[in-house]
Image (spheres, rainbow, N blue to C red):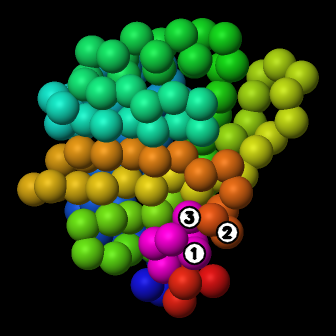
Amino acid sequence: MPLVDGVSGQGSRHRLLREIYDAANRGDFDALLARLHADIVWVTPTRRISGRNQVAGWLIGWHASAAPIHTVEEFADAGDTTVALVSISYTDARPDNHPAHVWRFRDEVVVRLEVFPQRDEALTVYGPAAR
């Protein structure tokens, strides 16, 4: 699963994910949620959230408290899964972080997101060749 430069990746999934991150950055949760399956599974290090409405509530709360800005650095693809290596900065005193977001698709709609705080864990699970 080779890494694809985040700037030059032209696949429809990469465009879709860029739209999701851009929508999150500007606080347009309707646009973000429209790209998620109604039964999305959203897994963070501290919780597992199911369904678009539950994800909406969590996202709005998290963005209100943390004000994160996401910057995609690279994508890696394998089958129905895309790993996004992301840099997240905050407007408060929190340090930036650099997680991997593992997105799973069905018919070009996101059905699952799993957040890995340590990128190496995601790359080990979803693409050792991407290291």
Above or below: residue 68 compared with residue 11 = above
Compared across the picture, whether 98 is left or right of 116 comes to right
Mark 3 to mark 2 CA distance (whole Å): 5 Å
**Residue 12 covered by magenta stretch:** no
Q: Is residue 36 left or right of residue 6?
A: left
Q: Are marks 3 and 2 in contact (CB under 8 Å)?
A: yes
- Residue 124, given in percent of the width and then of the height, sits at 57, 75
Q: Is residue 6 visible?
A: no
Residue type at mark 1: give it. Thr
Q: Is residue 31 above or below residue 86?
A: above
Q: Residue 72 in the image: state x and y as whole percent.
A: 56, 55
* Residues under numbered marks 1 and 2 in contact, where contact means CB atoms less than 8 Å apart: yes
Q: Are marks 3 and 1 in contact (CB under 8 Å)?
A: yes
**Magenta segment:** 122-127
- Report the front residue among 44 and 26: 44
Query: Element under label 2?
Result: helix
Q: Residue at x 66, y 11 (%)?
A: 65
In the image, residue 126 lies in the stretch drawn in magenta: yes
Secondary structure beneath dot 1 equals helix
Label 3 element class: helix
Left or right, 64 with reference to 12: right
For residue 124, which numbered disc appears in the image? Answer: 1
Neighbour tally class for label 3: few under 14, some 14-19, many 20 plus, Cα within 10 Å: many
Q: Residues within 10 Å of mark 1 (few under 14, many from 20)?
A: few
How far apart are labels 1 and 2 at the CA level? Answer: 6 Å
- Which residue, given by chain and number where applicable, does mark 3 sit on? 122
The amino acid sitting under disc 2 is Asp
Q: Amino acid at mark 3?
A: Ala
Instruction: State the image quarter where residue 91 is shown.
Output: top right
Mark 3 → mark 1, Cα distance in angstroms = 5 Å
Residue that badge 2 annotates? 120
